[in-house]
Image: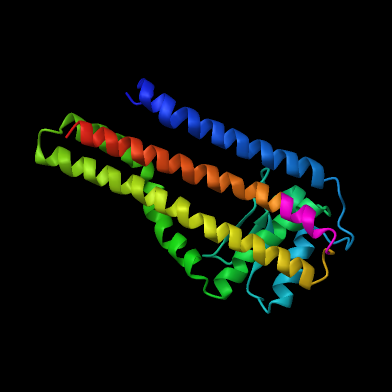
Amino acid sequence: MFFLDSHYLLLVALPSFLLALWAQMKVQGALKRYSRVPAASGLSGAGAAAEILRASGINNVTIEMTRGFLGDHYDPSSHTLRLSPDVFNGRSLAAVGIAAHEAGHALQQAQAYAPLGVRSAIVPLAAMSNLAWPVLILGLILRASPLGALLVTGALLLFLALVVMQVVNLPVEYNASRRAREALLRCGIVSAQEEGGVKTVLNAAALTYVAAALGAILQLLYFLGLARRNN
């Protein structure tokens, strides 16, 4: 029903798509440029991450290669840093920058960075946000009953959890990027002249989180208005 709603298409779906497309274009452009620029240190992404962790006194993190393009992430539950093949083996500014960013999350965990803990706590609830759609539809169908009102409220809370996670994601990701750039310079993995390229790559990657957060906010606002109109 929502995808046939012109208001949803114009106010949520289209802006969200355009934001995601814009962010993806920025990422692809930065990667295309700086994946061709070798880091003067000669370290691979995996080597750069390992050096940052070693220099920070972190010895309980495993670095492994994972499949998929841009599947790079840090798993705080298993203390595992997973890097895509191009990042794991790559020796470009883009590769060491992305690997350092993921290592930055390990530094956050080691130093008990509060927003990371908040994000980890919200993730299980936000993961249930897919259930919000059928719950909201059922609630609107039963809107004349107490159960319908309860279902609508529950669905909106699930959407809210997703928005909170996406918003909290922003300081977490930007902080990890800042830590990454500082660590790369401190460890001598990149020079001051090379740091600009790393910053460009990481700032472009961060735009994907900005787009996701704005899209989630638009969706929540739409459903709040929909629930109010059907109250």
Does the rendering let one see residue 65?
yes
**Location of residue 5 (image quadrant):** top left
The residue drawn where x is 49% and y is 34% is 16
> Which residue shows up at 65% across the image and 57% down it?
82
Span colored in magenta: 192-200
Work out whether 230 lies above or below 196.
Answer: above
Which residue is outermost to the bottom? Answer: 57
Residue 119 located within the stretch drawn in magenta:
no
- Left or right position of 154 against 42: left
Residue 70 in percent (x, y) is at: 66, 46
Identify the residue at the far left of this view: 145
On screen, 72 above or below 121?
Answer: above
Of 95 and 13, which appears nearest the observer? 13
Q: Main secondary structure of the magenta part?
A: helix
Residue 66 in view here: no
Q: To which quarter of the image does residue 68 belong?
A: top right
The x, y position of residue 155, in whole percent, is 28, 43
State the scheme by which the image is colored.
rainbow
Q: Is residue 125 left or right of residue 139?
A: right
- Estimate the x, y position of residue 35 in percent, counting from the top left: 81, 46
**Quadrant of image for the N terminus:** top left
Query: Which residue shows up at 69% across the image and 64% down it?
Result: 180
The mark total stands at 0
